[in-house]
Image (cartoon, grey):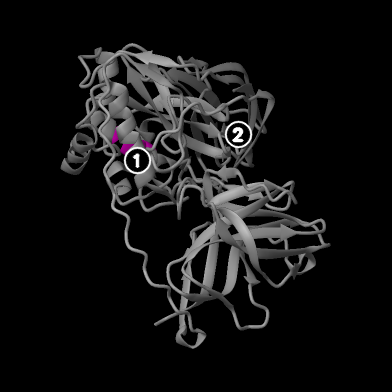
Amino acid sequence: MGGRIQLEVTERYDPAPGTQFISVKSARTPSFASRTWQQRLVSETIAYSAPPTKATEAQDENGNVILTERWDRPAARVEIVRKIVVQSEAALSPLTSQAPYPLAAVSAETARFLRGTSMTQRDDPRIKELAQSLTAGARTEWQAVTAILNHVVDRLHYQHDPPGHDAITALGGVVNCQGYSHLSLALLRAAGIPARFAVGISLSKAWRVRLTDGSLTFKMGQGRHAWIEVFYPDIGWVPYDPQTSHLFVSIYHVRQAVGLDVNEVVGTIVGAPSLPAMNESIAGDGADETFGLTTVRQAKAPRNYVVSSPVTETAPVVVPPPPVTPTPPTPPPIVLRRQDLTKLVEFGNVEFPASLRIFTAGEAAEGGTARRAGRTFVVETADYATGREELAQAFRADEPMVLSQVSLALQKFGGQTGELWLEIFADKDRKPGARIAESRRIPVSALLARGGYRWVIFDVAPDAQGLLLQPGRYWAVLRSSGDGIFNWYFSLGNAFGEPDDSRSSPRGAGDWSNILNYRFNFRVTGLAKP
């Protein structure tokens, strides 16, 4: 996997009257090389609407080059355009590691990344107990790391703007990329494994891995992103994205800085006496991309989909036999009577942002004479829903129900002709099977392109009687005609349901063998028994 990645980051700061200064702090993009992933900086240029009064560069204790730009008494908008080009390569050749677990002593420079912080509370009893239980059977470092990160990807659920980003809050199970990274770091450090926080920019470009019976598509949001790097004494620092990949990250990650946690590496904006109005947009694309990823083995853990470089260990590995699970008795069939179903029920993957908050709330700085804000890691995550690929989302009825509506989180970008509608399918072999219903069709012209994502409601039973569903798994497939341009919002990772609940097919082909490693936002409405 390789390619040339081009980014254009545009920042706009509109000062309030009487602003004394605006200061912007950010990391310069470095080159970086590991055994599995390399990033070579080709170019990095900066253009200003007005040159800064002062610009300085300094290296911090983590080796990051930090650029600080300051404008004194700005009278008009300050616009900064940063253009970055990197050549990236992910080489998933087999690795051999002899690192035992527990680890032997490491250098003082590396041992720094065993420390706990306010975001990675490695000494908290809950973290220590969990780390100990997860690594109890590990004999090599790779086994210990894999056990911890498998737990993280299966335990956590993505939310674009969760209540907190530290490891303890992440134990509650709702996080974005910061929470995935901070909990991973806290557990690894509690287990005696050096690990550090990595920050950069991800592109919203899909990459695909061939499976024995289909394919698996990974995709991130476009914007600020966080992941981690783990130290192996015989391999060095190796990147992991706790959401998607072990021992490497995709070429659509652009690495900019590393540190103990987000507080050491996040870019900040300071204004005095108040913050300016702020906006940031990130455009990016890839060129000369090459892919050739095919699975050579599929493991039973984790439950969710993660891609890893293969590892050969010299230490013996003891694999316990799988537990024997008795087959439960077949329950009697449930008799479904429409008149018994009177309670309104709604469920689905319903959390999505109408708008994106890309800067933190301001806080006091400079002894109270200024205000400081940081960049967040909130990104837009959506798929083009009316293009060459058709999209399907599974849902499960846990009890008999009358299905009346399915709503999708859509945004219209253009078009006036044609229609949108849903088709409901029964499940067959964990894919859409037989079609059982079609929703009322919505004219594209009836939907407004007004910005932001909103619920578009599809009436599944136009006769108002509803569709009778027995308990089971079903699929909603979005269909379209005409020239409408729509995106369907999704949550990264396993935010809801099962690991293979989202799939795509070439338009009109009916081949649903491609699994999507994310969950579309949807809402099912109907009636169930009180």
Instruction: Between residue 415 and residue 432, name the one nearer to us.
Output: 432
Q: Say above or below: 20 vs 335.
A: above
> Badge 2 is on which residue?
207
Task: State the extent of the magenta-drawn residues as a range.
Answer: 181-186
Instruction: Between residue 166 and residue 516, name the one nearer to us.
Output: 516
Q: In the structure shown, which secondary structural element does the residue marked by tag 2 occupy?
A: strand
- Could you say where residue 373 lies in the image, as x and y percent from the top left? 45, 43
- Determine the image quadrant of residue 442: bottom right
Instruction: Between residue 269 and residue 366, name the one nearer to us.
Output: 269
Q: Mark 2 belongs to which amino acid? A: Trp
| Category of crowding for the residue at label 1, using alpha-carbon neighbours closer than 10 angstroms: few (below 14), some (14–19), many (at least 20) | many
Q: Say above or below: 427 vs 389.
A: below
Q: Say above or below: 421 vs 162.
A: below
- Determine the image quadrant of residue 515: top right
Residue located at (37% from left, 53% from top)? 163
Q: Say above or below: 89 vs 520.
A: above
Q: Is residue 495 left or right of residue 206?
A: left
In reply to whether residue 78 is colored magenta, the answer given is no
Q: Examine the rendering and report whether any part of residue 191 can be seen.
A: yes
Q: Is residue 499 left or right of residue 53?
A: left
- Could you say where residue 40 lies in the image, as x and y percent from the top left? 57, 16
> Badge 1 is on which residue?
152
- Could you say where residue 429 lies in the image, as x and y percent from the top left? 54, 52
